[in-house]
């Protein structure tokens, strides 16, 4: 096989497997995202932002470095449409309109749902989507998003094909805007001259920052929400909070909790260690029994959560005790 064919097949396969193997996908329902097989909560939104920037600048840079060669060498839509057109225009089918149309529609019917599935899987858990499709769960919005996407891709494969490139593809239009004398000739030399060189530096910096951010991430998320506030009990005033620790790792993890700035006259929370199963959330109740002398005094309590690997997350609690 030629280099170009290898690359086309590789990119086509990547398009399908990237969300399935969590190389990159966003779970819009559970508010998580995955990069290079690692799971993140939206608290780590800067990693998502960096990933999206790297993706956007990858496409911009490819246009600048190699001109319109992305279409011919890498675009999954072009690869797929190209091979389908080659097949339906082949000698065996050219003079047999019935067989040609049957194969054309048959392949569109087979591939449109597969491509539709992959597209939705970038934004929705693929296992959940598969279960909804198998059980024909019409009450799920994702089922209908899948259905509409499948119809769209059926039209793309069966009707639009290269007409989409000429008339509607935003990336095709971007390529025309970015195209200049150098990029029209294409080539690796463009990576080291003019605006192409600026993009090379920018991409190197962004990818490095992204890798550092991914490998230094904590692997867990912490949130604290108010619960009971200012309820008198015996001689004290009760304030409670729900502490949620979400373990984003693929193995169970033990966490130690430390509390700072709690006045000595308060009864402080007892929770000191929590073990959370893999990919799960543990909710703990933090109870503060506050003495009457602290009424009207603003206190910032710091909660420090540390995992077995020594990674920590700090959260501040602002407590302003009042009498009710
Ligand atoms: S114009 Fe758009 S859809 Fe067409 S081959 Fe290029 S990138 Fe792909």
Image (cartoon, grey):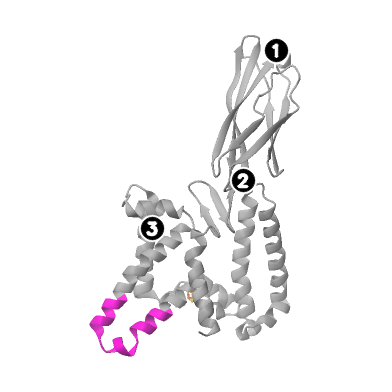
Q: Which residue is mark 3?
A: 146
The numbered dot on residue 95 is none
Rounded to the nearest whole Å, what is the CA distance between mark 3 and mark 1?
Answer: 58 Å
Q: Is residue 219 left or right of residue 84?
A: right
Tell which of 45 and 37 is nearer to you: 37
In contact (CB < 8 Å): disc 2 and disc 1:
no
Q: How many marks?
A: 3
Q: Is residue 94 magenta-colored? A: yes
Tell which of 50 and 269 is nearer to you: 269
In contact (CB < 8 Å): disc 3 and disc 2:
no
Rendered view: 240 above or below 66: above
Q: Is residue 5 magenta-colored? A: no
For numbered disc 3, what is the local secondary structure?
helix
Cβ of disc 2 within 8 Å of ligand 1? no
Q: Is residue 10 left or right of residue 156?
A: right
Residue 72, x across and y down, in percent: 51, 80
Q: Which residue is mark 2?
A: 43
Q: Mark 3, residues whose alpha carbon is within 10 Å: few (<14), some, or many (≥20)? A: many
For numbered disc 2, what is the local secondary structure?
helix
Whether residue 191 is visible here, answered yes or no, is yes
Rounded to the nearest whole Å, what is the CA distance between mark 2 and mark 1?
Answer: 36 Å
Q: Which residue is mark 1?
A: 292
Rounded to the nearest whole Å, what is the CA distance between mark 3 and mark 2?
Answer: 28 Å
Residue 297, x across and y down, in percent: 73, 20
Locate the C terminus and report the quarter of the image it occupies.
top right
Residue 91, x across and y down, in percent: 32, 90
Residue 138, x across and y down, in percent: 32, 50
Residue range in magenta is 82-104
Mark 2 or mark 1, which has the lower sequence index? 2
Whether residue 165 is visible here, answered yes or no, is no
């Amino acid at each position: 096989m030629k280099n170009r064919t290898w690359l086309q097949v590789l990119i086509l396969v990547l398009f399908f497997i990237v969300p399935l193997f969590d190389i990159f996908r966003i779970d819009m329902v559970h508010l998580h995202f995955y990069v290079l097989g690692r799971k993140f909560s939206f608290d780590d939104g800067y990693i998502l932002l960096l990933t999206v920037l790297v993706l956007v600048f990858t496409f911009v840079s490819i246009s600048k470095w190699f001109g319109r060669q992305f279409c011919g060498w890498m675009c999954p839509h072009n690869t797929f449409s190209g091979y389908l057109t080659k097949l339906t225009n082949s000698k065996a089918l050219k003079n047999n309109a019935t067989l040609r149309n049957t194969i054309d529609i048959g392949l569109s019917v087979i591939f449109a749902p597969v491509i539709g599935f992959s597209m939705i899987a970038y934004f929705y858990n693929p296992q959940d989507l598969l279960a909804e499709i198998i059980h024909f769960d019409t009450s799920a919005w994702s089922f209908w998003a899948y259905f509409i996407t499948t119809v769209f891709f059926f039209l793309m494969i069966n009707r639009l094909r290269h007409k989409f490139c000429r008339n509607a593809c935003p990336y095709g239009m971007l390529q025309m805007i970015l195209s200049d004398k150098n990029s029209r000739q294409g080539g690796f030399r463009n990576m080291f001259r003019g605006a192409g060189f600026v993009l090379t530096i920018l991409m190197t910096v962004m990818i490095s920052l992204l890798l550092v951010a991914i490998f230094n991430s904590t692997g867990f998320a912490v949130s604290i929400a108010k619960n009971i506030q200012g309820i008198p009990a015996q001689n004290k005033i009760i304030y409670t909070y729900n502490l949620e620790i979400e373990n984003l790792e693929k193995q169970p993890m033990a966490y130690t909790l430390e509390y700072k700035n709690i006045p000595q006259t308060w009864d402080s929370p007892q929770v000191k260690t929590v073990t959370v199963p893999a990919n799960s959330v543990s909710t703990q109740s933090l109870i503060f029994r506050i003495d009457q002398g602290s009424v009207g005094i603003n206190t910032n309590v710091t909660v420090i959560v540390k995992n077995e690997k020594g990674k920590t997350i700090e959260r501040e609690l602002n407590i302003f005790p009042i009498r009710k």
